[in-house]
Amino acid sequence: MAENPSAWWDSWVEEAINTLHSLKVLRSLRPICLRSSSLQFGLHDEAFQVFDEMQHWDRSSVEVAIAESTFSRWMHDTPSAGDEIVCSAAGGDDEAGASYEKFKKLILFSGNDYLGLSSHPTIGEAVAKAAQEHGMGPRGSALICGYTNYHRLLESSLADLKKKEDCLLCPTGFAANMAVMTAIGSIGTLLAGNSIPSEDEKIAVFSDALNHASIIDGIRLVERQKSVKVYVYRHCDMSHLNMLLSNCRMRKKVVVTDSLFSMDGDYAPMVELVDLRKKHDFLLVIDDAHGTFVCGKNGGGVAEEFNCEKDVDICIGTLSKAAGCHGGFIACSKKWKLLIQSRGRSFIFSTSAPVPVAAAAYAAVKVAKLETWRREAIWNRVKDFHLLTGIPVTSHIISLIVGSEDKALQASRYLLQSGFHVTAIRPPTVPPNSCRLRVALSAVHTRQDLENLAGALSRCINFQDTRIYGCNGYARL
């Protein structure tokens, strides 16, 4: 057992970077500096307007409406390409004879805007200022001309949040996971003289059975390149993972897992993973898409919640969920950033985020940090759901497993009629006969919202017969 489990990986990454340098394919980020009064204004926390309680605009992130035609198609489970024509909620016809639809109002319980930041005026102001000053900004990939001081400032703020040396922005969370997996796979190839590595030189990747599709697709890609060997361990089963690790004779080991699983609402066993990391010297990679900004005292995510930030080597996150914006990121060391920006194809060959989006995300990082009441509120809603239903939920993602597809669809339609947007989750997203209602809580839901939802749920499902976590044996890889 190594004193520092990441020491071997540091040397392998450095060797891979040196190989890239010798081959003259090590890529650099060269920020374009856009002169901006709004950017300089945003450097200090006190420059951002924040609030100490919910405001009226916050509710727009959970109060939505759908056209009557959409409602009808949904109720009858009629396939739709989203082509319903929607003109206005006002009713009546205009002079040209266009039909105006009526709308049905719904409370959204299926979104990922966990803190309700998508409607925050400070974030909207940041978007508007950046757009007025720079339009959409330089358009190109980050390695060419799409990387600016706005992007760099956002990266620095996310690195601070995750307590990592640096950070790399990606177009989406999906692209971030793909970039990390392809960069990891490239190490085996680079250290084997830029050729297919032998079995001993390959990288052993251990993946939770219920990891996100973006992790799975990244693993599939590097598998095709014959640079990794993949082991899938049963969902959150540390005994099974320990057995696989103990029986693996390959030196380069990686364990990758979601930190908070999006379809089950359960956490990866972080404390046990850290213990196994010390025992087996593997690289620990987590996808903290659903924990970032929500979990932990400072919103640092699941690793902060379980006090193991220093034990996570690479943390992937998204800006499209609790941040209420768009984009993905990879928090890591500077060496890993250099490698990923040189070998992560989904990063290299994607256009960088528009400047206004980067400005909005930076403002969201600041607001999420300062408005601590939002984290308190969402965890109060978790407690409310438990008290109202008796179901022992532990996170803001509540997976109510009802069984068959028909049961899930019937329950979803009943909730729709009752004024709640809660979708039925079906195969292939989840295993057969484990169809579910996925309820996502938000900081801007009220206690009354939860009481109304619990009442509607009690009329379409039996709380005592409802499971909240799925089967451990189902692997999507």
Image: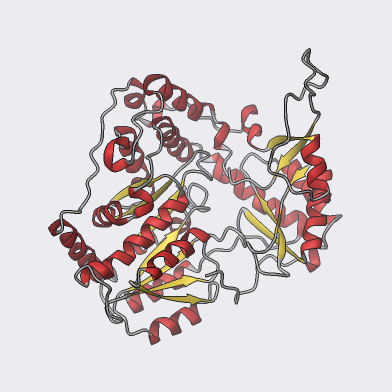
Res. 64 image quadrant:
top right
Q: Is residue 93 above or below residue 465?
A: above
Q: Spot the residue most to the right.
A: 459
In screen coordinates, is 289 left or right of 350?
right
Q: Residue at x 39, y 31 (%)?
A: 355
Residue sitting nearer the eye, 3 or 170:
170
Residue for point 53% across, 59% down: 260
Q: Is residue 339 left or right of residue 291?
A: left
The residue sitting at 70% across, 37% down in the picture is: 83
Q: What colour scheme has been applied to the protein in the rendered image?
A: secondary structure
Tell me where residue 433 sits by quadrant. bottom right
Quadrant occupied by the N terminus: bottom left
Residue nearest the viewer, comparing 398 with 330 = 330
**Outermost left residue:** 22
Quarter-of-image position of residue 45: top left
Q: Is residue 418 visible?
A: no
Is 259 left, or right, of 199 in this rendering?
Answer: right
Asked if residue 334 can be seen in this view, the reply is yes
> Of 308 and 37, which appears nearest the observer?
37
Total count of labels:
0
x and y, in percent, of residue 390 in the image:
75, 61
At which x and y percent is residue 416?
A: 80, 45
Q: Residue furthest top?
A: 95
| Residue 394 image position (x, y, % from top left) | 62, 60
Residue at x 77%, y 48% (from the top left corner): 453
Q: Residue furthest front?
A: 96
x and y, in percent, of residue 412 in the image = 78, 52
